[in-house]
Amino acid sequence: MPDKISKERRSENMRRIQSKDMEPEMVIRRLVYGMGYRYRLHRTDLPGKPDLVFPSRKKVIFVHGCFWHQHGDPDCKIARRPKSNLDYWNPKLDRNVKRDTSNQAELQEMGWDHLIVWECQARGREDSENMAIRIANFLG
């Protein structure tokens, strides 16, 4: 199936995607800060450069984009794979998932616990009270 937008427009859209400070991450950061927890951001010395790092607890939180990290929840509408240019997208998305798994295993070997918050959860599929409970239980 051909792409619905031009190659130039698709390229421009992809160029604008950032890896830090996206809205779902900011939602979680505000929530965690409001709960009284303090954290470090994007520590490059840890596998996967976790979004929020709690050094004294040896815990990290990743805020994963559902599309880029391929959220496996069937109710998630964001994670669907593209229908065009499959020779490009399938290996790319598969590599992302494999890298995530590897980073999480490496963190665990180093004695760090991790929590993944998916974009769709941060954007309201899970209300903030339930998210706060989930994060408090993790950091507890």
Image: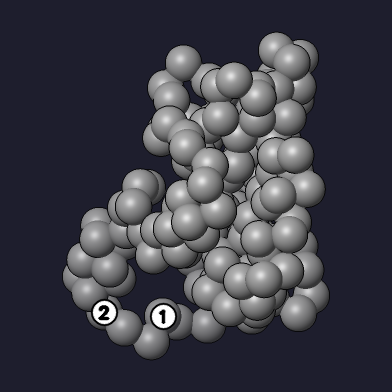
Q: Residue at x 63, y 55 (%)?
A: 117
What's the amino acid at mark 2?
Ser
Q: Position of residue 108 (x, y in %)?
A: 76, 22
Is residue 80 shown above or below 108? below
Q: Which residue is nearer to you in this view: 49 or 89?
A: 49
* Residue 75 left/right relative to 44: right
What's the amino acid at mark 1?
Asp
Pointer 2 residue: 6
* Image-quadrant location for residue 10: bottom left
Q: Is residue 89 visible from the viewing direction of this image?
A: no
Q: Position of residue 59 (x, y in %)?
A: 65, 30
Pointer 1 residue: 3
Is residue 42 shown above or below 134? above
Q: Is residue 1 visible from the viewing direction of this image?
A: yes
Q: Residue at x 41, y 35 (%)?
A: 41
Q: Residue at x 48, y 56 (%)?
A: 34
